Image (tube, rainbow, N blue to C red):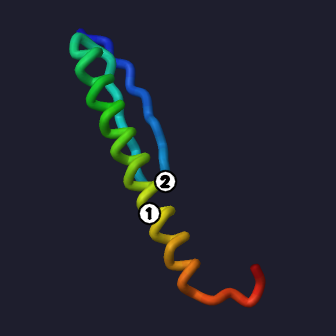
Amino acid sequence: MKMKKVFKYQSGHHELLYVSNKNHERHERRNKELFLKTMKDLMKLLNSIVHCRKKIPLEFH
């Protein structure tokens, strides 16, 4: 029987699973890439929101 540890990283709506077993390294690298991609997407989203906010004239600054 193989022992598997499962870790969960939560960022917004994304839940990344990481399984540690023989493919430990590969999983970790893939997870890191996914995590970075998710962070990039979140930053893009944030930037676009900020961008939209700039276009809308706000009563208070």
Residue found 57% across the figure and 87% down from its top:
56
In the rendered image, residue 43, in percent from the top left (x then y), is placed at 46, 55
Q: Amino acid at mark 1?
A: Leu
Q: Amino acid at mark 2?
A: Gly
Residue found 28% across the figure and 15% down from its top:
24
Residue found 50% across the figure and 73% down from its top:
51
Q: Nearer the viewer, residue 13 or 60?
A: 60
Residue corresponding to mark 1: 45
**Who comes first in sequence, dot 1 or dot 2?**
2
- How crowded pointer 2 is (Cα within 10 Å; few <14, some 14-19, many 20+) is rated as few
What label does residue 60 carry, if any? none
Residue found 29% across the figure and 24% down from its top:
29
Against 10, residue 56 (above or below) is below
Query: In the image, 33: left or right of 56?
Result: left
C-alpha separation, residue under disc 1 versus residue under disc 2: 12 Å
Which numbered mark, 1 or 2, is in the foreground of this view? 1
Identify the secondary structure beneath mark 2.
loop
